[in-house]
Amino acid sequence: MNASGRIIDSFHRAPRPIRLLGASGQLGYGIPAAAFKAGIERRPDLIGCDMGSIDIGPTYLGKGEMATSPEATRRDLRRVLLAARSLDVPLVIGTAGSAGAAPHLDSTLAMLRDIARTDGLRFRMAVIRADIPRPVLSDAVRAGKVSSFDGMPALTEEDIIEATNIVGQMGMGPFRKALEADVDVIVAGRACDTAIFASLPALLGFPVGLAMHMAKIIECGSLCCVPGGRDPILAELDHDGFVLESMNPDRRATPTSVAAHSLYEQSDPFTMQEPDGTLELTHAHYEAVDDRRTRVSGATWRDTTHPTIKLEGARKIGERAVLLCGSADPRFIDQCKALLPKVADLVQSLVCEDQPMDYTLRFRVYGIDGVRMVVPENEAPPGEVFIMGECIAPTRERASEVVRSCKQFLLHYGYPGRLSTAGNVAFPFTPPEVSLGPAYRFNVYHLLHVDDADALFPVEVETV
């Protein structure tokens, strides 16, 4: 019997609280060794790792590349794999390779297989793919089974063709199927963070509301603590609630910090929508066990009657080049909002002399409006600013031409009251213009309405 089968059998024979270790909020950025060791010493029944997010933006999904470095990713994978095999408990990884599409999943699987060869490991592994077939999605668009949210325009068949990768965010069903297949390791493509941790408790008969609430918190590691961090966190779940404890002794899971985490990535702190249903936190209760641990209870669950799958896809929009510079001239800073569009117009007149405008050029002035969406009126200008000019053009060469011309004319552009013609801005390094390669944007960010939320996520099992 393999790890998941052994755990399921042991709970059926002798029910008890279940311990789950949230090893990493995003695998591949490093796992604090001391905290992870402390977590393993507590002998969890499952080690779970979220490996991705859309927080990293559309480029990694579009390019099919990991956001994390190969060296750090392999080190983290080896650490959690060796630990899970030493305890003979399931290792569950979701959103493999940062974005969870086929290239990301395949890269993660290649690393795990190589680690197994190098370290002499043998295990049974379930693989769950999250790529949505384009014909299926096109049929759904024509049938009116795709809806928009978050201000996205209606999905078109052209969007489906243009997206380089399209994934759906799976819920608990595929994970439960994989666990029932008697495996040691589960590696999934794009997945809800909660499904990584809630699937086994739900399969064992623990209340789904409590399991989902616990999963929502521990998928982020010790971020729910004071001070917050990414150290591993241990949850012990019974049929009435769960206790949270960071594996870093310097971090405290307090009732206030844990309750506040319910706001994380949520517009509504009391109701959370998942593919499988709705998590209700209206009656959630947070109580200190001691100065480092909090017990949580009261969450309830309502199964959905209309399953949906969140779709994510990205298409290439061009090549990106940026110009980086700064200024401490109060006269320049005071006028830069009006000055920068004039520089852009001048650059357009030069680089588009014999061809139409085929690029976009935007500026962000950090210190004035680089971060905030709304700037207070009559705010006094800062003492210095940092300027980023971004160009997206059809080719790398065209983007570079635009920002190089922009650099020269921004440096010497005249304005009323200027004291020196030697330069309006300073460059942090040379060259100050950098080509960043292909630029992508999300063009698929929609809900797919389905009859069976699990049918699109096949489970494959292999022996490594």
Image: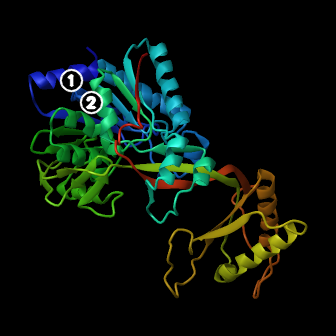
Q: Give x and y (percent) for residue 135.
A: 54, 42
Q: Count residues near mark 1 (Cα–Cα under 10 Å), then give few for <14, some for 14-19, many for 20+.
A: many
The C terminus - image quarter? top left
Secondary element under disc 2, as helix, strand or loop, is strand
| Kind of residue sitting beneath label 1 | Ile
Q: Is residue 326 above or below residue 300?
A: below
Q: Residue at x 61, y 73 (%)?
A: 384
Q: Quadrant of residue 421?
A: bottom right
For this view, does 337 lie left or right of residue 382? right
Q: Is residue 181 above or below residue 381?
A: above
Viewer-proximal residue among 66 and 199: 199
Secondary element under disc 1, as helix, strand or loop, is helix
Circle 1 or circle 2, nearest the eye: 1
The N terminus - image quarter? top left
Residue receiving disc 1: 7
Q: Give x and y (percent) for residue 207.
A: 15, 42
Q: Residue at x 44, y 47 (%)?
A: 53
Q: Give x and y (percent) for residue 101.
A: 51, 38
| Kind of residue sitting beneath label 2 | Leu
Q: Is residue 144 above or below residue 24?
A: below
- Whole-angstrom CA distance, mark 1 to mark 2, is 9 Å
**Any mark on residue 46, and which?**
2
Instruction: Of the two numbered discs 1 and 2 on the same chain, state the one appearing first in sequence.
Output: 1
Please report contact status of discs 1 and 2: CB closer than 8 Å, yes or no: yes
Viewer-proximal residue among 129 and 257: 129
Residue most extreme to the right: 354
For this view, does 226 lie left or right of residue 371? left
